[in-house]
Image (cartoon, rainbow, N blue to C red):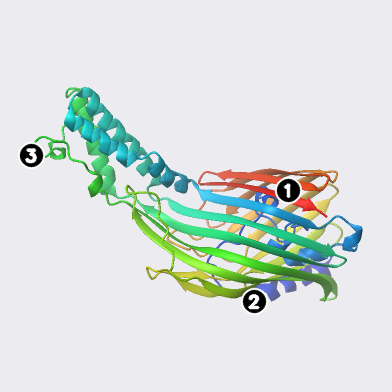
Amino acid sequence: MKRQEVHSAVLLAIGVFAVADVSAGTKYGIYDARTLAMGGASVASAVNDNAQFYNAALLAFNEEFEEKTLDSRLLLPIIAPQLSESAFDVEDVSTRDLPGDLQRSISAFNASPDANTAQAVADAATDLDALATDLTGEDLFGDVYVGFAISEPGKYQGAGFFFGTRLLGGGATGVTDNDLALLDDYQEGLLFVASGGTQGAAHPELFDAGGALIDPTDNFDSTVEATGVAIIEVGVAMSMQTQLFGRDVAIGTALKMQQVETFEDIERLVDDRIEVDRDDASEVDFNIDLGLAMDVGEHWRLGLAIKDAIPYDYETDLGTRVRLRPRPRFGAAYRRGSLQLAVDADLIGNEPLGSEAETQELAAGAEWSFGQAFRVRGGYRLDLLGERDGIASAGLGFVWKRLAVDVAYAQGADTRAAALQLGLVF
């Protein structure tokens, strides 16, 4: 890069970052299959299909009038869920009904105490203990987006429309040492009975004065806590190229109306799945996304964007404040021939919604194009604060006549995600 180009890029970065708040209530977000497949990189590498979600300025890089091209898109539907492994484990407690298995095995033992029914109690306690141990100290988080979008880029300008719902939740499990110790006692005590005293250990305190085995589930106090927001938003994106610092720079905005509902829930782990307790009344607010982008040399493109530039505070029924703050992100993309490489970085940390850990993401991705009809993508997402494990991703996109299909899957040690979108080319 030339020195003047680098100088312009630095000034551009300072200009956007200077207006950003120092905390963010949610992550920047992944709203489509292409971006999920590319690890979340999008601020400098998004295309006409998805630029309105990440950096509307990127809609202004077409060099032809819209009626001479097939660069417009209608995406319907877009489905992109991301969930922590701990969320699946919490669901397992309910769907497998492990507390119920323990209760039923205790009832069967009390009705007919023998080696077989004693072993069934020990097995049920072991299953519940294993899952509770997996959940100990685990964060809960989820980010699910469902929506549709239309984009219509023109010559050095573009526009788009989107409508969707984003459900964000975060929290933590509170598995207590007392519960784990009690489950260990039931495993040892009932194994002792089943083996005729050759294994395990006697635990007479597990039986009442009449000799019946006590049901411990009413005494479990492990909890699951979740806090979050449901955001229904409708937005219009606009972009154009102009001169800034003596260079051609694209400027974009997305004007949005948002209906926001907060929720918070604290449940005993053995009772049931998380029951979402929403506020009685939702709030409707106006917000805006801001974006800048410019080409540097023949192959590089830089981008900066702020998601939800207007800060808002909301409160759950239980009194917890949920802070939604501007989320600035920087991106760089390199394109040569059929290959595109991209990297994004959060400029500030993502403040937790609930009691989960703060994060700050670095995302990298690549896309290989095979003509105009088929694309292969891959990526990796990393938490710079070290609170979350990395997430690897991959995906495909193809166009058949006027139908566009994109799919993606991502997985890390503590997260699973997938995305599907169908589109019409026009």
Give the labeled residue for mark 3: 209
What is the spatial separation of the Cα atoms under label 3 and label 1, in whole angstroms? 68 Å
Query: Callout 2, which amino acid?
Result: Ala
Quadrant where the N terminus sits is: bottom right
Q: Is residue 232 above or below residue 199?
A: below
Give the labeled residue for mark 2: 18
Q: Using the rendered image of the protein, determine whether residue 243 is visible from the camera's viewpoint.
A: yes
> Is disc 2 placed on a helix, strand or loop?
loop
Q: Using the rendered image of the protein, determine whether residue 349 is visible from the camera's viewpoint.
A: no
Q: Residues within 10 Å of mark 1 (few under 14, many from 20)?
A: many
Locate residue 307, reporting x and y percent. 63, 68
Q: Mark 3 or 1 closer to N-term? A: 3
Q: Mark 3 or 2 closer to N-term? A: 2
Locate residue 5, reporting x and y percent. 82, 68
Quadrant where the C terminus sits is: bottom right
Locate residue 132, reporting x and y percent. 35, 43
Locate residue 83, reporting x and y percent. 52, 50
> Is disc 1 placed on a helix, strand or loop?
strand
> Is disc 3 placed on a helix, strand or loop?
loop
Query: Seen in the image, is 122 located left or right of residue 153?
Result: left
Query: Callout 1, which amino acid?
Result: Ala
Q: Residues within 10 Å of mark 3 (few under 14, many from 20)?
A: few
Q: Do residues under tags 3 and 2 come within 8 Å of each other at their CB atoms?
A: no
- The label nearer to you, 1 versus 2, is 1
Give the labeled residue for mark 1: 366
Q: Is residue 291 above or below residue 146?
A: below
Query: Seen in the image, is 135 located left or right of residue 184?
Result: right
Query: Callout 3, which amino acid?
Result: Ala
What is the spatial separation of the Cα atoms under label 3 and label 2, in whole angstroms? 70 Å
Quarter occupied by residue 234:
bottom right
